Amino acid sequence: MQEMNREFIVPGALAVAEVRSGQYIGEIVEVNSPRAVFKVLAVLKHPEQGDLHHPYNPDVAMFHERRALSYTEKTNVLLRDLKPFEGEVPDYNVSLQEAVSAQIAALDRLMRWSARGLELLKELRKEYK
């Protein structure tokens, strides 16, 4: 596998980071190989809810609530989980609302798909008798 160019990983650079199933735009504050201190500036993808080891299973021992990282919250990120970011950083609160709305829309679509599939399967079950 080809090694990705990591020259952009310097203090002050903007990057996109994957952190606990969420995705954020932020600033690299400090680099301590193999990690960097990352300061959150905006949310691209809200973290997923539930047990990540058993996705889409509501009947787990602990259904996790995952909050998005806060504005200017600092977290350690593996260098491999950083990608360069170019462009204008959106307002944190606006980006957070958009990320939550996108997650809700995706779950709503999944619920509608599940309900429709369940309805069709119940009809098929009647035919199979």
Image: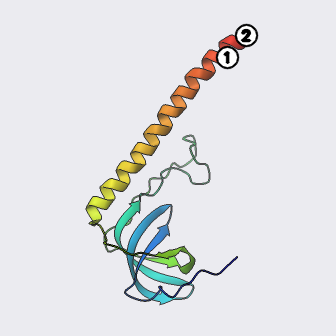
Q: Position of residue 86 (x, y in %)?
A: 39, 75
Location of mark 1 (residue): 125
Disc 2 residue type (three-letter): Lys
Judging depth in this view, the residue of 102 and 39 nearest the camera is: 102
Q: Where is residue 1 in the image (x, y as percent from the top left)?
A: 70, 76
Quadrant in which residue 27 is drawn: bottom left
Q: Is mark 2 on a helix, strand or loop?
A: loop
Callouts 1 and 2 close, C-beta under 8 Å = yes
Quadrant in which residue 14 is drawn: bottom left
**With 6 as the anchor, is 43 left or right in this view?**
left
Location of mark 2 (residue): 129
Kindly identify the residue that appears in the image at 46 percent across and 42 percent down: 107
Q: Where is residue 74 in the image (x, y as percent from the top left)?
A: 39, 77
Kindly identify the residue that appears in the image at 52 percent across and 33 percent down: 113
Kindly identify the residue that appears in the image at 45 percent across and 58 percent down: 47
Quadrant in which residue 71 is drawn: bottom left
Outermost residue toward the right in this view: 129
| Disc 2: CA contacts within 10 A as few (<14), some (14-19) or many (>=20) | few
Q: In which quarter of the image is the C terminus?
A: top right
